Image (spheres, rainbow, N blue to C red):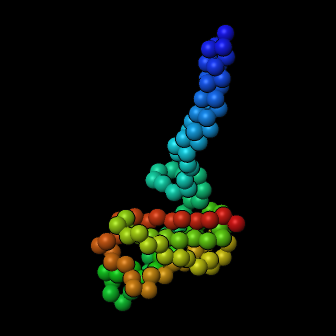
Amino acid sequence: MRSLIKLFTVLVFAGVAIFPIYAFASSSSEMKASGEGAGMISGWTTSNVHYQLSSDPSVVQGVSFDLDAPASMVSVKLSSTSTAYTSCTNLNAYRWQCDFPSGVSIASMDEFRVIAVGN
């Protein structure tokens, strides 16, 4: 009978010691949601995209476009190899202007990626 009580006590102690470790490991291994990706993401639709060329017609110095809803902050990039986004200026509730001080070579442009933040 004594050995049964000792066995039960050891099992309860082991369960109490192992449960928090298992729960912590389980909670830290799940995937977290992200707000950036490729493909269709709910949010804004862009339209009326207009590129402004510099004095050298092979370089874009700015881009303007419309969003289908107001946003508080918008950034854009035109090359998939670039990691830098350019901040845009709101011209009105839906129209945005993005200026590239050093310009973007048309030859390097292979995407039009917009990140917008809601109000």
* Total tally of numbered discs in the picture: 0
Q: Which of 113 and 52 is in front in this view?
A: 113
What residue appears at the point 61 percent right and 24 percent down from the top-left corner?
Answer: 10
What residue appears at the point 62 percent right and 77 percent down from the top-left corner?
Answer: 90
Q: Residue furthest top?
A: 1
Tell me if residue 53 can be seen.
no
Q: Nearer the viewer, residue 4 or 106?
A: 4
Q: Residue furthest right?
A: 119
Q: In the picture, which quadrant includes the N terminus?
A: top right
| Vertical arrangement, residue 82 with respect to residue 20, above or below | below
Q: Which of 44 and 21 is in front in this view?
A: 21
What residue appears at the point 31 percent right and 80 percent down from the top-left corner?
Answer: 58
Q: Is residue 52 left or right of residue 110?
A: right
What residue appears at the point 65 percent right and 67 percent down from the top-left corner?
Answer: 71
**Residue 20, quarter of picture:** top right
Q: Residue furthest left?
A: 107
